[in-house]
Image: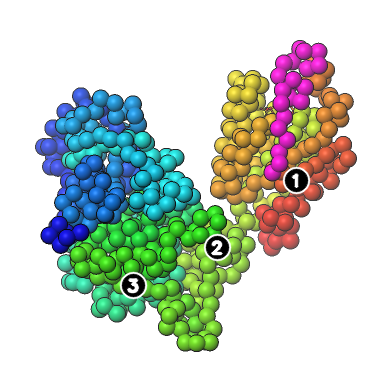
Amino acid sequence: MPDHLIKPHGGELVDLLVDEARTAELKEASRDWPSWDLTDRQVHDLELLLTGGFSPLRGFMSREDYEPVLESMRLADGTLWPIPITLDVTESFAEGLEAGQRIALRDTEGVMLAALTVSDVWTPDKRRKAEAVFGTTNPEHPAVGYLFNTANPVYVGGTLEGVQRPVHYDFRQLRLTPAEVRTRFAKLGWRTVVAFQTRNPMHRAHVELTRRAAAEVGANLLIHPVVGMTKPGDVDHYTRVRAYQAVLKRYPRQTAMLSLLPLAMRMGGPREALWHAIIRKNYGVTHFIVGRDHAGPGSDSSGTPFYGPYDAQDLLREHEAELGVVMVPFKLMVYLEDQDTYLPIDEVPEGARTLSISGTELRERLAEGREIPEWFTYPEVVTELRRTHPPRSKQGFTVFFTGLSGSGKSTVANALLVKLSEIGGRPITLLDGDIVRKNLSSELGFSKEHRDINIRRIGFVASEITKHRGIAICAPIAPYDEIRQDNRAAISAYGGYVLVYLNTPLEVCEQRDRKGLYAKARAGIIKEFTGISDPYEAPEDADVVIDTSTMSPEEAANQIIIELERLGYVDVNEDR
Ligand code: PPS
């Protein structure tokens, strides 16, 4: 781009919140406007637009800004801006919207947060956007997956008048706006400030890195973690913020400050790093730390990284002067055992013994309740992590039986219930087919639609029980694979999930016919009877398979307990 077309970042803060009188006027007028309920992502974007975190933007992007952002990371006026900030809406909402029209933007509770004056409405080419911004159309990239599968199809551009900031009830004293952070710096006399971006808990390596960075450039430190949306599967922000608060005490007094950033990350690697630097400049810092694989989503399923480890540093270096923020680049920090110290990997002397623990390894150590060494992190951080990530032997789990009527589900489930009660330590709920049909699903019949609703309900209750670290034993027929798989995914997010398939042959089930239902089904008195006149999809992902025609209920229950022990959810030898 020729120099005269480049508009440097001035650092003036945009403040889109209007005064009381205008707020009242807008609220009154909004009765006649269309109303859009913002998604979580949009609420976060709106907050940074309103408070100036996204200065110089004054609204959701128009097409005129969007196109050059895709192609050359610049707004229409030449200002560097790498990530599109767009308002995606449904086709039905977009229908009939015209330039000049007003829309009320509301949070999920229906509270009006802002008025948008529409500039234009268009349908973006999502694949082109993915390729241009994220360098890939692979939906395994979180932002590309979001764009393709979650984001609405139509974009509405327009300028904003803010009525109120999105409401947050947590860590209010740490949620400072750009203006508040700047005021705080001025009050403290901090002229040179280096910001540290993070979406992970901070361990010793991060503290050493930030202390070094601050010392290198003679700056104070702003620890500026993202508490909006981060990468799916990350440690939740409540845990992280408690850990950051603890870690803050590890810095020399009055040298470091913690403030939270309500950003919805895209995991866009180099472009995102540039965006982070612009945002931090708006918060008033002079320097910005960029480490290894900044804001990268890691690798795809074939093991290919989406971005090179230092691509973000390269891109920032290119634009540093124009940005007016100095990058403090950092290589990966590693621990030198012999010297009990951390060093950037390129400064490690030849042959020195280094240690490191990856994120995966840390999760495994937490899940197994193993030691987490002090060279890696601080005891106070471990305490916080263990509170939300207990070992598997303290996590909840679900044992989900599936099988034909009469296959022995209830009998084995009851035997398991008694055996797990004997081991003790966790509350247990039995969600037997009949119990559920009486208490949760009494209005349902046996059509596919009704069975699916029934199994979804069981899955929901079991996931809540698992989340609360109890044991759910479910024993419905659950004949359909897709719903079983959905339940597995939902429950596994909170704890253990073991699918037990009772593959007792139909002839045996029919012969048992305890309730006389098979006879009625054969006679056509009961319709849609599983195995006779209705399908049963045998699972291919069962963790335990049991044929009760060849095994006693006790043996069957023992087999399940052995599996639970193998996975670590039950520890019969555990100290109480
Ligand atoms: S499902 O498919 O999972 O929703 O079924 P579930 O809730 O487990 O209910 C199965 C019990 O209801 C009785 N019953 C029937 N089962 C299958 N098909 C039909 N049409 C039917 N009508 C009534 C039967 O007693 C099942 O109990 P179990 O314990 O499986 O024998």
- Please provide percent x and percent y for residue 321: 20, 68
Residue type highlighted by circle 3:
Pro
> In the figure, is residue 497 to the left or right of 333?
right
Q: Which residue is mark 1?
A: 544
* Distance of label 2 from label 3 (alpha carbons): 25 Å
> In the figure, is residue 147 to the left or right of 258?
right
Residue that sits furthest to the front in the current view: 2
Q: In the rendered view, tell whether residue 10 sits above or below residue 70.
A: below
Mark 3 secondary-structure assignment: strand
Mark 1 secondary-structure assignment: strand
Who's the residue at 34% across and 78% down the image?
Answer: 212
* Disc 1 Cβ-to-ligand 1 distance below 8 Å: no
Q: Earlier in the sequence, mark 2 or mark 1?
A: 2
Residue 75 in view: yes
Q: Which residue is mark 3?
A: 329
- Please provide percent x and percent y for residue 15: 16, 49
Q: Which residue is mark 2?
A: 360
- Coloring basis for residues: rainbow
Q: Earlier in the sequence, mark 3 or mark 1?
A: 3
**Is 535 colored magenta in this rendering?**
yes
Mark 2 secondary-structure assignment: helix
Residue type highlighted by circle 2:
Thr
Residue type highlighted by circle 1:
Val
Instruction: Select label 3 or label 1 by which is in front.
Output: 3
**Is 393 colored magenta in this rendering?**
no
Q: Which portion, as a residue range, is magenta?
A: 521-541
Who's the residue at 21% across and 64% down the image?
Answer: 323
